[in-house]
Image (tube, rainbow, N blue to C red):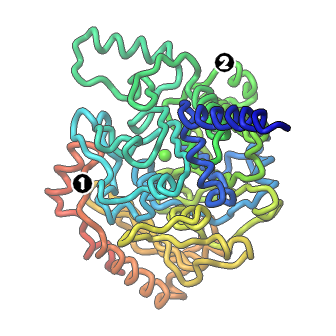
Amino acid sequence: MKLSNKITVFTVIFTLFLMSCNSSKSKIATKNVDVKKTTNKPNILVILCDDLGYSDLGFNGSKDIPTPNLDALANNGTIFTSAYVAHPFCGPSRAALMTGLYPHKIGAQFNLPPNSGETIKKGISLEETFISKVLNNVGYQTGIIGKWHLGSNAEFHPNVRGFDDFFGFLGGGHNYFPEQYRKAYAQQEANGRKIIWDYLHPIEHNGKQIKETEYLTDAFSREAVRFIDDASKTEDPFFLYMSYNAPHTPLEAKEEDLKLFSHIKNKKRRTYAAMVYAVDRGVKRIVDELKESGQYENTLIVFFSDNGGKVKAGATNFPLKEGKGSAYEGGFRVPMFFHWPNVVPAGKKYDFNVSALDLYPTFARLAGAEIPEGKRLDGKNIWDNFLMNKNSHKDDNIYVMRHRNGYSDVAVRKNDWKAVKVYQQNWKLFNIGVDMAENNDVRKDHLDILKGLVGEAKDWSGTHLQPNWWHDEKTGIEWKKDNMPKFEVTFKIN
Ligand code: CA
């Protein structure tokens, strides 16, 4: 090749290089610098369901709700049989997932009230660094799709809490059929209502209102595919928090899905089943996209529910006692699995206790991210022990506390033991290892164990803050009037 030709070829290549740097894809060009740093980092996909029952999935024993796509992931991954969330209802459980802390420690032990952005303008303390931010800081592309529930005011918006991309709604729930909720919204607006029920608000994408047309669960699955497709075109790994609001109320399902469950007589159960089925259908789309975009092999999928199933809304938590809102197992022991081809053991069960609080430090470890200085965490990085089927929580306590009107329900689990106090009854003690249904109170035989656990739970309660909000005004007034949280009474053993 003549020198002039060489120069021409060089010039063309160099010009192309400059063009690539100046194009809108310049982010990618910069990212190439970091390729070495990021190549070994997995994508992390959290698929969270809302109020999903412990046994409402094929892989956890459901007979009447087929979930073939979730089952395939679960059966090719590891199923956790003893996984707990940090609170038995939505907002506080989600706050714990994002902060790695028991919600009581940050004043988030109640749900934010409906329309919080327009009423109390509060949200999770800005002093807490969310896991999304930690991952974003080390180059992860971060997305949340679906339900937020951690503050609707601008300063608490997902886009300022570490998420590059947010598609969904800010409140605690949402109606599912756009045609219907848009009409209801317009009606309330026409009636002059200043604050319109946030289950009817338009869906948004990064702060901009969207005119959604699809059944919400399908819309969220579609957006997950879009996010993964976009993210896969760059060199950076992604963190996607797929926060389905299904099967949380209102119970609304598509006709085509309802038809599949005509054998279920109870209408609530039938609708709930169809809603779970819609999630499962969405999971297939997400998995297909992971495969098509070449991300499947490098993605850790973590599936669980934010709290137990609501029995009155059609859920079952069998064999666990009670459901959403309870300190019995049905309230906060949830279905969960990990899936990651060739990394997470396939076809296994992991029976040791784990907590959703463990996910923050575990994700940070997988991403090679530093925990921010001074950041308090209530969970542990369980990754290495998990892979070796070892216990990360030997002799550790897993707590749950739910405040009611004038009293508190509380439970503490350590190894196989669990102490429970609910509905102002006496403390009970169960050996969960042999009695997961909590039928056989053994406190008489092991009073020393009960006293130890209750004492530790009392110490733990000393780390709690007063609530920053209550789910409604009445509860706040009663809290102050009753001088809640009444820990002296709560931790007394009669
Ligand atoms: Ca929930």
Q: CA distance from mark 1 to mark 2?
A: 41 Å
Three-letter code for the amino acid on which mark 1 is drawn: Asn
Q: Quadrant of residue 336?
A: bottom right
Q: Is residue 383 left or right of residue 166?
A: right
Q: Nearer the viewer, residue 491 or 153?
A: 153
Q: As drawn, which residue projects farthest toward the bottom? A: 448
Three-letter code for the amino acid on which mark 2 is drawn: Glu
Q: Position of residue 286 (x, y in %)?
A: 70, 37
Identify which residue is drawn at 22% across, 13% down: 192
Query: Is 206 placed above or below 451 here?
Result: above
Q: Is residue 400 left or right of residue 477?
A: right
Query: Is 81 placed above or below 266 here?
Result: below
Q: Position of residue 179 (x, y in %)?
A: 50, 13
Q: Quadrant of residue 354?
A: bottom right
Establish whether ligand 1 lies closer than 8 Å to the Cβ of label 1.
Answer: no
Q: Say which element carries label 2.
A: helix
Identify which residue is drawn at 47% across, 91% down: 448
Mark 2 highlights which residue? Answer: 255
Mark 1 highlights which residue? Answer: 468
Q: Are marks 1 and 2 in contact (CB under 8 Å)?
A: no
Q: Position of residue 27 (x, y in %)?
A: 54, 40
Q: Is residue 339 left or right of residue 21?
A: right
Identify which residue is drawn at 53% across, 19% down: 177
Observer able to see residue 70: yes
Mark toward the viewer: 1 or 2: 1
Q: Say which element carries label 1.
A: loop
Circle 2 packing at 10 Å, graded few (<14), some (14-19), many (20+), is few
Looking at the rendering, in which quadrant would you find the N terminus? top right
